[in-house]
Image (cartoon, rainbow, N blue to C red):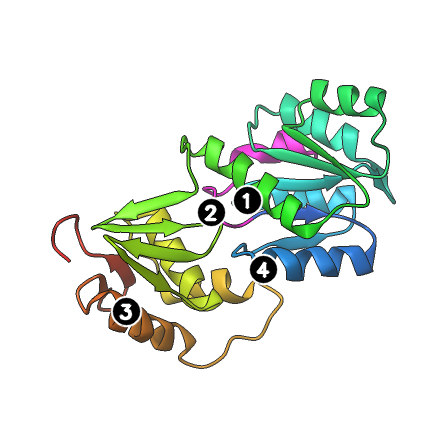
Amino acid sequence: MNLADMISHQARRRPGHPAIVEDDAVLGDGLSVGLRLSGFSPELVETCADARHAIAMEGFEAVVLDLMLPDGSGLDLLRELRQSGSDMPVLMLTARDGLDDRVTGLDAGADDYLGKPFELPELSARLRALTRRAQGRAENLLLWNGLALDTARMSGRRGPEEIAFSRREYTVLAALMERPGSILSKATLEERLYGWQEDVESNTVEVHVHHLRAKLGSGFIQTVRGAGYRLAPEGAA
């Protein structure tokens, strides 16, 4: 089954959840670690076939796509994605970064193009820019109940007060602020914290929510018994 046949089954896009399509194991692992440290929850696949399945079945927010893959071309996969009707942001990541290569990739539907070698902070910034524009936001800020969360610095500000968060506190808070009207289950937050390939520590979500309430006020995050967590309604925290 090709991507065009499967795309209608695609799950709702999950903020902060990009796919990395890269067959170099060392580079792929480095990208996964680096993006996770920048507040993303990436999933790594190594082939066109695995990418087709993952893109169709998972709610990815964006795709970081290598050009040369063991079972085909990332460019063909990009064209297939666009022909399926998907507008998911795609960042091409490749050693072939000549002018003609960049023009071809962009004209095929890529939203951005980054040549190897590259620096992880630049990749993270480009990915934030792509996802921010896709969400209709002009700045790296999530706003709710007087809190401004800076997604680039992973810190918050409430009035004149700057609030520091650990990486995992930020990850939980960002997940909630990206969908302020939604209840997020413990499993959803665990996946955002650890990804699908990692073991989950016991009670980790509860611990981070407790720390966030200590910093933001006990009413900022509400527990919905049997369902998960949500932000307090605007003006109620």
Instruction: From the image, tell me which residue sits under label 4.
Output: 36
The kind of secondary structure element at disc 1 is loop
The label shown at residue 60 is 1
Instruction: Give me the residue at 72% from left, 52% from top.
Output: 45
Instruction: Give me the residue at 19% from left, 56% from top.
Output: 232
Cα–Cα span, label 4 and label 3:
23 Å
Judge whether residue 42 is colored magenta. Answer: no
The kind of secondary structure element at disc 2 is loop
> Does residue 210 appear in the picture of this structure?
yes
Instruction: From the image, tell me which residue sits under label 3.
Output: 215
Mark 3 vs mark 1: which is more N-terminal? 1
Q: Residue furthest bottom?
A: 202
Which is more foreground, mark 4 or mark 3?
3
- Give neighbour class at mark 2: few <14, some 14-19, many 20+ (Cα, 10 Å): some
Name the kind of residue labelled 2 in the image: Arg
- Give neighbour class at mark 3: few <14, some 14-19, many 20+ (Cα, 10 Å): few
Instruction: From the image, tell me which residue sits under label 2.
Output: 14
Cα–Cα span, label 3 and label 1:
30 Å
Query: Is 216 left, or right, of 139 in this rendering?
Result: left
The stretch of residues the image draws in magenta is: 1-17
Cα–Cα span, label 2 and label 3:
26 Å
Cα–Cα span, label 1 and label 4:
15 Å
Q: Please identify the quadrant where the C terminus is shown.
A: bottom left
The kind of secondary structure element at disc 3 is helix
Name the kind of residue labelled 1 in the image: Phe
Q: Nearer the viewer, residue 8 or 55?
A: 55
Name the kind of residue labelled 3 in the image: Lys
Res 43 quadrant in image: bottom right
- Give neighbour class at mark 4: few <14, some 14-19, many 20+ (Cα, 10 Å): many
Q: Please state the horizontal and vertical placement of residue 111, each as a whole percent of the image.
A: 63, 28
